[in-house]
Image (tube, rainbow, N blue to C red):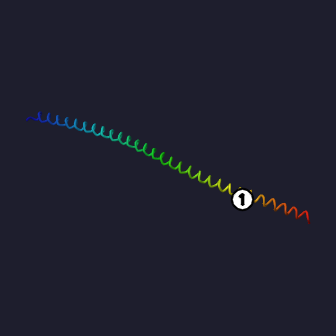
């Protein structure tokens, strides 16, 4: 094998190596693009799931809050009714007491 033939084989081998490197670089870039796209899709999917869970938790909290609010309002109304009834009962005694004082003041 002559010098020229060896040089041609070396050039051919170098050309093949360069082509293989370029193909490997293209494959690497494509794999990176695919991985990035899959990561973005997964992130979006997880974000959607998190937002759905957030809305679910918020809805549950709102229901519990509404029930607690109604319980507090009902207790407040019951207490107000009780106080109003006590006040109405005391009105008659207060009127009697004022009348007694007034009558006592007239007889003095």
The spot of residue 16 in percent (x, y) is 19, 35
Counting labels gives 1
Classify 10 Å Cα crowding around label 1: few (below 14), some (14-19), many (20 and above): few
Q: Pick the residue in front: 69 or 45.
A: 69
Outermost residue to the bottom: 108
The percent coordinates of residue 12 (x first, y second) are 17, 34
Along the horizontal axis of the image, is 105 left or right of 90? right
Circle 1 — which element?
helix
At x 30%, y 40%, the residue is 31
Image point (91%, 62%), residue name: 106
Q: Nearer the viewer, residue 80 or 51?
A: 80
Which residue appears at 45% of the width and 44% of the height? Answer: 52
The quadrant holding residue 38 is top left
Quarter of the image with the N terminus in it: top left
Which is nearer the eye, 65 or 28?
A: 65
Residue under numbered circle 1:
86
Q: Is residue 58 above or below residue 30?
A: below
Residue farthest along the left direction in this orientation:
1
Is 11 on the left or on the right of 54, as rendered? left
Q: Residue at x 40, y 44 (%)?
A: 46
Q: Is residue 37 left or right of residue 89?
A: left
Point out residue 3 in the picture as x, y percentages from the top left corner.
11, 35
- Return the residue nearer the eye: 15 or 66: 66
Report the quarter where the C terminus lies: bottom right
Residue 41 as seen in the image, left or right of residue 17: right
């Amino acid at each position: 094998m002559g010098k020229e033939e060896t040089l041609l084989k070396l050039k051919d081998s170098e050309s093949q190596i360069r082509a293989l490197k370029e193909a490997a670089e293209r494959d690497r870039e494509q794999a990176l693009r695919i991985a990035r796209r899959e990561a973005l899709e997964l992130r979006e999917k997880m974000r959607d799931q998190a937002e759905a869970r957030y809305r679910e938790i918020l809805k549950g909290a709102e229901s519990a809050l509404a029930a607690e609010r109604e319980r507090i309002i009902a207790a407040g109304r019951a207490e107000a009714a009780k106080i109003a009834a006590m006040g109405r009962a005391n009105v008659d005694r207060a009127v009697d007491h004022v009348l007694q004082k007034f009558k006592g003041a007239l007889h003095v």
